[in-house]
Image (cartoon, grey):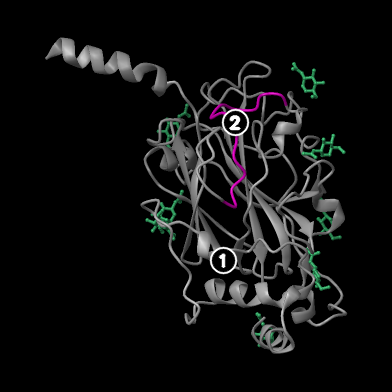
């Protein structure tokens, strides 16, 4: 028995050293499965990384969306105020393995086009949420993720419609006491935000990634253990307060006609067991129903365009 246990431990030891990635996001009742690192399993709005390991170079382009993050095929539909429920797992699919360090969430506008193919080079990112220490001032929110919680982030309730990349980033500080030791795990999910809100970030609240972090920032080169009660100052910009942009000059329904890519495929979201869940055309569930109708808007007949204008 002891031998067996040792053998099992030996088998699992290398995997225990692995890091992790985002395996799925749940938005407004729609579950979107991600691909595991370096393995294409199906279309997803989550940009797939090539490894479960971290970015450690604050100047590397991988800081934007994770190591080798490639294109993704879908946009997940969301609304202002939607809760994005993110599941982080370890490289072997178990619980996220780290517990020390913050979780930051940014958005960048892909513009009024789909985020499919959006190049993050030069993108201006703004912070929408920062999670650090728990109420006791000692433990970190990341510990809850390690213990199996999902991470929930709420989109700004006045977010203007359009394509956005949502960048949810865990920073592992377990080795951050030496320069280059901090471990960045960014993950980007492509969103298509619907609605007719008007909030946009002030330019001074937006940053470049890479660009916003330096290896010697006190929040990045930091000993999280010697004084575990110390408060933590987040890296990057403060949480942006969105300002109302001038009202859209074109009706929102026309804006939806402007989407250049026919990639909204709600029929392709996959259920928790990896099964494909087909969207129901008769459903009153807005995020499932509307994109299917709007898909007809670009090339559609007049009645389809009218229906789209009515519904969108
Ligand atoms: C970090 O990334 C930048 C930009 O790609 C590169 O110039 C630099 O050599 C890298 N530094 C290290 C230590 O790898
Ligand atoms: C987040 O999603 C998980 C399933 O992945 C679910 O169990 C949990 O209730 C969800 N939490 C929220 C706040 O929606
Ligand atoms: C993104 O843009 C940068 C800068 O223009 C370029 O070097 C890079 O190749 C582009 N990436 C892709 C995937 O097109
Ligand atoms: C996310 O929300 C769920 C349900 O409300 C909760 O159980 C979980 O602890 C939350 N996750 C975090 C990291 O707060
Ligand atoms: C747009 O705003 C109007 C008025 O505030 C509201 O009635 C309508 O439901 C909104 N449309 C969408 C798609 O959110
Ligand atoms: C950016 O400008 C807005 C509005 O003028 C202000 O409220 C905010 O504090 C500024 N942010 C920074 C980081 O200076
Ligand atoms: C940290 O705070 C806890 C209570 O939250 C206290 O028991 C502990 O002594 C403090 N540790 C230090 C090093 O100040
Ligand atoms: C993210 C973004 O640029 N959204 C804009 C898309 O276009 C509408 C209509 O012109 C604007 O209101 C949004 O601000």
* Residue 18 at x, y percent in the picture: 46, 24
- The image quadrant that residue 214 belongs to is top right
What residue did someone put label 1 on? Answer: 82
Mark 2 Cα shell of 10 Å, populated few (<14), some (14-19), many (≥20): some
- The image quadrant that residue 292 belongs to is bottom right
Q: Residue at x 55, y 34 (%)?
A: 101
Seen in the image, is 39 located left or right of residue 221? left
Nearer-the-camera pick, 42 or 122: 42
Seen in the image, is 105 located left or right of residue 275? right
Q: Residue at x 56, y 20 (%)?
A: 175
Mark 1 Cβ inside 8 Å of ligand 2: no
Query: Which quarter of the rendered picture does the N terminus lie within?
Result: top left
* Residue 60 at x, y percent in the picture: 75, 28
Extreme-left residue of the structure: 1
Nearer-the-camera pick, 122 or 241: 122
* Residue 299 at x, y percent in the picture: 74, 75
**Sequence-earlier tag: 2 or 1:** 2
| Secondary structure at numbered mark 2 | loop
Seen in the image, is 146 located left or right of residue 20? left
Dots 2 and 1: beta carbons under 8 Å?
no
Q: Residue at x 36, y 52 (%)?
A: 273
| Secondary structure at numbered mark 1 | loop
What residue did someone put label 2 on? Answer: 50
Q: Report the span colored magenta.
A: 44-57
Mark 1 Cα shell of 10 Å, populated few (<14), some (14-19), many (≥20): some
Query: Which quarter of the rendered picture does the C terminus lie within?
Result: bottom right
């Amino acid at each position: 028995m002891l031998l067996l246990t040792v053998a099992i431990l030996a088998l699992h030891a290398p995997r225990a050293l692995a890091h992790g990635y985002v395996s799925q996001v749940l938005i407004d009742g729609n579950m979107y499965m991600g691909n595991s690192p370096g393995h294409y399993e199906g279309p997803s709005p989550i940009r797939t990384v090539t490894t479960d390991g971290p970015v450690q170079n604050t100047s590397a382009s991988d800081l934007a969306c994770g190591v080798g993050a490639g294109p993704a095929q879908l946009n997940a539909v969301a609304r202002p105020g939607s809760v994005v429920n993110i599941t982080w797992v370890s490289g072997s699919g178990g619980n996220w393995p780290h517990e020390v360090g913050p979780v930051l969430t940014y958005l960048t506008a892909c513009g009024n086009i789909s985020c499919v193919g959006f190049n993050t080079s030069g993108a201006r990112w703004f912070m929408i949420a920062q999670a650090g220490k728990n109420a006791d001032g000692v433990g970190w929110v990341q510990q809850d993720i390690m213990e199996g919680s999902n991470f929930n982030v709420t989109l700004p309730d006045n977010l203007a419609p359009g394509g956005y990349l949502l960048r949810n980033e865990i920073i592992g500080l377990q080795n951050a006491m030496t320069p280059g030791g901090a471990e960045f795990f960014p993950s980007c999910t492509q969103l298509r935000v619907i609605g007719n809100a008007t909030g946009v970030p002030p330019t001074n609240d937006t940053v470049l990634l890479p660009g916003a972090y330096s290896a010697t920032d006190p929040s990045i080169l930091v000993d999280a253990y010697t004084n575990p009660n110390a408060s933590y100052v987040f890296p990057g910009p403060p949480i942006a307060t969105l300002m109302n942009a001038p009202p859209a000059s074109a009706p929102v329904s026309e804006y939806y006609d402007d989407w250049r890519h026919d990639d909204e495929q709600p029929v392709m979201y996959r259920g928790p067991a990896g099964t494909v869940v087909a969207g129901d055309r008769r459903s009153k569930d807005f995020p499932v129903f509307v994109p299917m109708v709007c898909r007809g808007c670009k090339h559609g007949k007049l009645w389809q365009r009218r229906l789209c204008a009515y519904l969108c």
